[in-house]
């Protein structure tokens, strides 16, 4: 069975600094998808970044980038130049297919210090 | 402690039929959230319930959709007279005290044909 682990319940970072959120997963499959979602107090779940396992290049979206280590089954999220609006819960998720039947990590609460 | 259980995993309905999606929260969790994910989009909040109460249904379409979380049993998201646009993945999350610490189910994939 696939599992997703986020070992950091809470992280804090100074505004404008860089922070990395950890995520590891377990699967025996070779093709799959990985996601980072942001959940602000509004309760919406916002897709931050998506990575296909067959792609070696790490996905990047503006200030957000991932470090995808397939052999180590690690998928960390790096947020550069942290802003107050980045404060939220961040969830790592795994999917076997594009239908987004997702397996979720427990989430990391990110606090931004002004 | 089993995680958040959603069933069925896949549901196919013809236009005009009713769809019932079930969510069994984790043991000890009294807060339930339902989200809908359309292809290539993030999850959109639909409704937030506590046992026997709807706390916030601001994301729920006004017609055809309803949700409940009875004292006993799973939370149910009910969609009456489904249309093709209802096809999506529906996710449920539960927590003991609000969004922090919420755990998500694997979702129910609804396909309307």
Image (spheres, coloured by chain):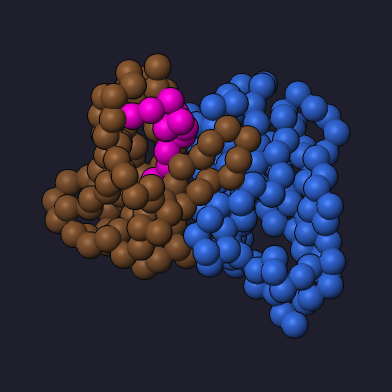
Chain colours: A blue, B brown
Membership of B8 in magenta stretch:
no
Q: Nearer the viewer, residue B69 or B112?
A: B112
Q: Residue furthest left?
A: B72
Q: Residue at x 17, y 53 (%)?
A: B70
Compared to residue A52, the image places residue A80 above or below, namely: below
Residue at 59% x, 26% y is A98
Magenta residues (range):
B82-96
Residue shown at 40% from the left, 17% from the top? B113
Q: Is residue B37 left or right of residue B56?
A: right
x then y, percent, for residue B93? 40, 50
Query: Looking at this rendering, what residue extends furthest in the bottom direction?
Result: A114
A31 relative position to A43: left or right? right
Q: How many marks?
A: 0
Q: Does residue A72 appear in this view?
A: no
Q: Is residue B83 magenta?
A: yes
Question: How far across and how far down the image is residue B95, in percent?
Answer: 37, 59
* Residue A99 spot, x, y in % from top left: 54, 27
Seen in the picture, residue B72 relative to A72 is either above or below; the reply is below
Q: Quadrant of residue A58?
A: top right
Judged left or right of residue B43, residue B81 is left
Considering only vertical position in the picture, is B36 above or below A53?
below
Depth order, front residue of B80/A91: B80
Where is the C terminus of chain A found, in terms of image quarters? bottom right
Residue B47: percent from the left, percent from the top? 37, 54
**Quadrant of residue A94 within the rendered picture:** top right
Residue closest to the eye, A65 or A25: A65
Say whether residue A83 is visible.
yes
Q: Quadrant of residue A31?
A: top right
- Residue at 83% of width from left, 70% of height from top? A17
Give the side of residue B75 with respect to residue A59, left or right. Answer: left
């Amino acid at each position: 069975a696939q599992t997703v682990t986020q070992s950091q319940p809470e992280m804090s970072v100074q505004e404008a600094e860089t922070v990395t959120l950890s995520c590891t997963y377990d699967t025996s499959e070779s093709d799959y998808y990985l996601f980072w979602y942001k959940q602000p107090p509004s309760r919406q779940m916002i897709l931050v970044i998506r990575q296909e396992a067959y792609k070696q290049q790490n996905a990047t979206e503006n200030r957000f980038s991932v470090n995808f280590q397939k052999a180590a089954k690690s998928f960390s999220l790096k947020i550069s130049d942290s802003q107050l609006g980045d404060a939220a819960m961040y969830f790592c998720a795994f999917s076997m297919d594009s239908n987004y039947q997702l397996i979720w990590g427990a989430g990391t609460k990110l606090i931004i210090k002004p | 402690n089993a995680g958040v259980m959603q069933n069925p995993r896949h549901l196919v309905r013809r236009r005009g039929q009713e769809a019932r999606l079930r969510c069994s929260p984790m043991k000890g969790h009294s807060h339930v959230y339902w989200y809908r994910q359309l292809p290539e989009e993030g999850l959109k909040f639909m409704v937030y319930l506590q046992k026997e109460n709807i706390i916030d249904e601001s994301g729920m379409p006004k017609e055809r959709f309803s949700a409940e979380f009875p004292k006993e049993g799973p939370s149910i998201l009910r969609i009456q007279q489904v249309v093709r646009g209802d096809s999506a993945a529906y996710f449920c999350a539960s927590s003991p005290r609000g969004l922090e610490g919420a755990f998500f189910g694997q979702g129910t994939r609804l396909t309307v044909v």
